[in-house]
Amino acid sequence: MTEAHWQFEEVAPLHAARTSQRDVPTTLNTYTANQRIVGEEMARRGWGQAELEQRRKADAEKIKITRGLRAGTTMAWGWIAKRLAMGTSGYTADCLRKAACSQDMRSVGLNRF
């Protein structure tokens, strides 16, 4: 047996353990849970997919849903932006940042913003 072959045999089981099939359902469950959260929030507001797409990208209710998703889950900005029809991931993140900033300003009595 060559040294390279021996090294491969030692490393292959370690690599297989790190990329096991048990990781796939976790990702799928996270995705499914986030889809469920968005669906529940839309139903609570009486929205369908058409209503979601007709609303402005920076709609206050969309920002509330985004805030909840980011606080309670690990979903990426791109997924949230696409699912809530909010444009790009950067724009979605910026909307949430601006909403948080304006809320902070109101809490200290600066209502101009």
Image (spheres, rainbow, N blue to C red):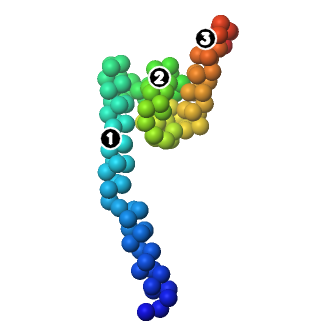
Q: Mark 2 points at which residue?
A: 64
Whether residue 4 sits left or right of residue 33 in the image: it is right
Marks 3 and 2, how far apart at CA: 17 Å
Q: Are marks 2 and 1 in contact (CB under 8 Å)?
A: no
User: Looking at the picture, does residue 57 appear above or below residue 33?
Assistant: above
Mark 3 or 2: the one toward you: 3
Whether residue 96 sits left or right of residue 75 in the image: it is right
Q: Mark 1 points at which residue?
A: 32
- Residue at coordinates 50% horizontally, 19% vertically from top-left? 60
Type of amino acid under label 3: Ser
Quarter of the picture holding the C terminus: top right
Badge 1 density bin: few <14, some 14–19, many ≥20, Cα 10 Å: few
Per the image, label 3 sits on a secondary structure element best described as helix
In the foreground, 64 or 47: 64
Type of amino acid under label 1: Thr
Marks 2 and 1, how far apart at CA: 20 Å
